[in-house]
Image (cartoon, grey):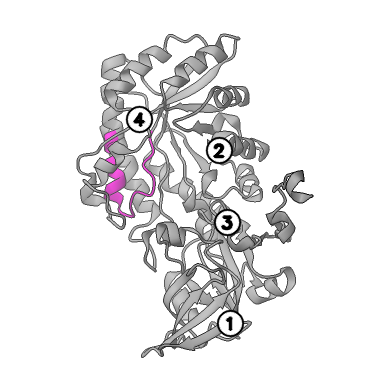
Amino acid sequence: MTLGTAPTGAAVLAGILAPGDALEVSGEGRLAIAGHDAAGLLDRFGSPLSVIVADALRTNLRRIRAAFEPGWPAPVRVLYAIKANDTLAIRTLLSREGAGGDCFGLGELHATMMSGADPARVVMNGSNKDAAEIAAAVAAGVTINVDSTDEIAYLRACCANGNRARVDLRLKVLPTDLDRHVEQARPTPGGYVEGVRRVKWGFTVPAAADLLRELATIPGVDLAGYSCHIGHLSSRPKAFAAVANAIGQAVTALRDLTGFVPRTLDIGGGWPPDRDPSFRKPGLSASTIEQIATATTAALRSALPAGMAVPELWIEPGRFLVSNAVVLLGRIGAVKRDAGLCWAHLDISTNNLPRIETGQFHYTILPADRMHAPMDETVQVVGSTCFRSLLGADSAMPAPRRGDTVAILDAGMYAEVFSTQFNAVPRPAAMLLSTQGADIVRQRETIADVFRQHRVPAWLAG
């Protein structure tokens, strides 16, 4: 099927470029990533290939910090949420740039600390932390975001040995006006705020007041402040302002009930990148991070108690830092035309971008070595696994050919960490492009790697 007015890949890219993108199109119509020809990278390192751009990570980190600092009179700390992408090279680069960290569980704590992150700017999250996790967090010197009553006993046990534990208390806020400002791409029965009430995270003001009083009785516990996170919230500044206002109101209410004044206020993540696959549609987000940060800090400051010392502001971006910093490259294999449709099979699949199937993410797909060719055919871009593996439905592409290079943008968030080996397909290599050159930072898996942890009992093997 052909399209009436056929744009080119270069024109599509020009309309959606964002700060931090390291993408250019040569006069010959070839896509370059940080100065490296995309097809040439596959020739050199194999296909498929995950390409990470160091300068994009730095730009995104500096940009979000600069977005929040003008509206906040106290220090602003950026804590990378490693759950978005746990590639150690990414985590290490962000540590060198001064980013702290948001960890969930021992694995993420291990990766964050081995990357060189400053423990004074690292938090441990989770509503089901066990004694071993609390002990590890205390030993590492990171802040524990208390999110269950069980943690009280674990903290008492740790601190009984003379240890000190720095903690925040995680709050649950329910802004009454939030539903008006949230795009309901994934409608929640009863509304968005009802969905927040039902999730497992945080404590409302009455429960938090009781826990504050109990934490204050534990020798060795340094109660630093509060944390609150409502993820994947919206692209609208007013949604973030509504949450910030509710956080400020909770801090005020808890000060009135307990007298506690926080030194730090961790308002979590959910900050959308300029192009956000999770919003299920192409193009740029409705608002910039600068607009969102301005609305957030203004609402939070106005809701805090008058005369109270302004706490440090901590934010936990994940997808904002890594989304556009990674491009997934692959090649077209079989092309099938039948039943009025065209299917282009890639050596990429939803194994590599599983949130397409589990979250209906939408990714921009570009013809990397034919960026000046008219995108005049409607193509079903699919992976080669035995599921539908629909990477792009009704995608505009130049008439696909075996061997063509395809680039999928914004593959940095929740791709590596959710990836699978369905059909026993090994996962691709990842490389980092920087001023130092091109470095492989995660080896390509082999079929032997897929089955490396499997064991067959001797009685079966024999």
- Image quarter for residue 261? top left
Q: Is mark 2 on a helix, strand or loop?
A: strand
**Residues at discs 2 and 1 in contact (Cβ within 8 Å):** no
Distance (Cα) linking label 2 and label 1 = 45 Å
- Label 3 CA crowd tier, 10 Å (few <14, some 14–19, many 20+): some
**Residues at discs 2 and 3 in contact (Cβ within 8 Å):** no
Q: Is mark 1 on a helix, strand or loop?
A: strand
Which labelled disc corresponds to residue 433? none
Q: Give the residue number, with chain letter if any, for mark 4.
A: 171
- Label 1 CA crowd tier, 10 Å (few <14, some 14–19, many 20+): some
Which labelled disc corresponds to residue 334? 1
Q: What residue type is labelled 4?
A: Leu
Q: Give the residue number, with chain letter if any, for mark 2.
A: 100
Q: What residue type is labelled 1?
A: Ala
Q: Which amino acid does label 2 sit on?
A: Gly
Q: Earlier in the sequence, mark 4 or mark 2?
A: 2
Q: In which quarter of the image is the N terminus?
A: bottom left
Which one is nearer the viewer's eye here, 200 or 292? 200
Mark toward the viewer: 2 or 3 = 3
Q: Which of marks 4 and 3 is nearer the N terminus?
A: 4
What residue range appears in magenta?
Answer: 228-246
Residue 223: in sight, yes or no?
no
Q: Residue at x 47, y 30 (%)?
A: 128
Q: Is mark 4 on a helix, strand or loop?
A: loop
Distance (Cα) linking label 3 and label 1 = 22 Å
**Residues at discs 4 and 1 in contact (Cβ within 8 Å):** no
